[in-house]
Image: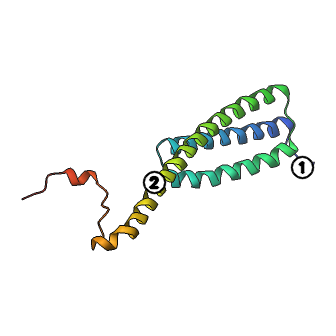
């Protein structure tokens, strides 16, 4: 007797839910990375997340869920979307922060170009740093 070409329905349904659970885990990890400001790692994790979404898309096309599994899928999706919304808010805040920093940098550069040559120094528009307040050894 030959092996069936498709897994039994229950196994296929569980595989789909497992894929949603993996996506939830990835979304939670991305949220954690954004919360602590690990932006490069977040970008790497986003690649993994998108691969999981592609896998889910393929599974969704072939698996029909019974009502019990549909309810579990809805719960997982709700949590995934919640993490996604929080992560997006953190990304928008980071984007805004970087925009402000870029604007300040551009302003300092314009001021330096306009007035720096007249001062004869490259540090004419010096930006104060915390370490400047530290006592200097004598």
Q: Earlier in the sequence, mark 2 or mark 1?
A: 1
Residue 23, given in percent of the width and then of the height, sits at 67, 42
SS label for mark 2: helix
Residue 79, given in percent of the width and then of the height, sits at 66, 32
Residue at (33%, 70%) from the top-left corner?
A: 116
Q: Nearer the viewer, residue 94 or 64?
A: 94
What count of labels does the image hold? 2
Which circle marks residue 127 in the picture? none
Q: Nearer the viewer, residue 116 or 44?
A: 116
Residue 36, given in percent of the width and then of the height, sits at 46, 43
Q: Is residue 20 left or right of residue 123?
A: right
Which circle marks residue 5 in the picture? 1
Residue at (81%, 45%) from the top-left corner?
A: 59
SS label for mark 1: loop
Q: How is the image coloured?
A: rainbow
The furthest residue to the left: 138
Dot 2: few (<14), some (14–19), or many (≥20) neighbours within 10 Å? few
Q: Is residue 71 left or right of residue 133?
A: right
C-alpha span from label 2 to label 1: 57 Å
Number of the front mark, 2 or 1: 2
Q: Is residue 96 left or right of residue 27?
A: left
Q: Nearer the viewer, residue 15 or 94?
A: 94
Question: Dots 2 and 1: beta carbons under 8 Å?
Answer: no
Residue of label 2: 101
């Amino acid at each position: 007797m030959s092996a069936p070409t498709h897994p039994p329905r229950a196994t296929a349904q569980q595989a789909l839910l497992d894929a949603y659970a993996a996506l939830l885990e990835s979304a939670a990890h991305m949220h954690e990375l954004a919360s602590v400001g690990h932006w490069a790692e977040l970008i790497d994790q986003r690649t993994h997340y998108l691969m999981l979404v592609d896998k889910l898309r393929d599974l969704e096309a072939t698996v029909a869920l019974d009502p019990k599994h549909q309810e579990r899928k809805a719960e997982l999706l709700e949590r995934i979307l919640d993490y996604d919304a929080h992560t997006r808010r953190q990304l928008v805040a980071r984007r805004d922060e970087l925009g402000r920093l870029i604007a300040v940098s551009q302003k300092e550069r314009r001021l330096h170009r306009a007035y720096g040559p007249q001062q004869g120094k490259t540090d004419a528009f010096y930006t104060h740093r915390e370490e400047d307040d530290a006592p200097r050894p004598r």
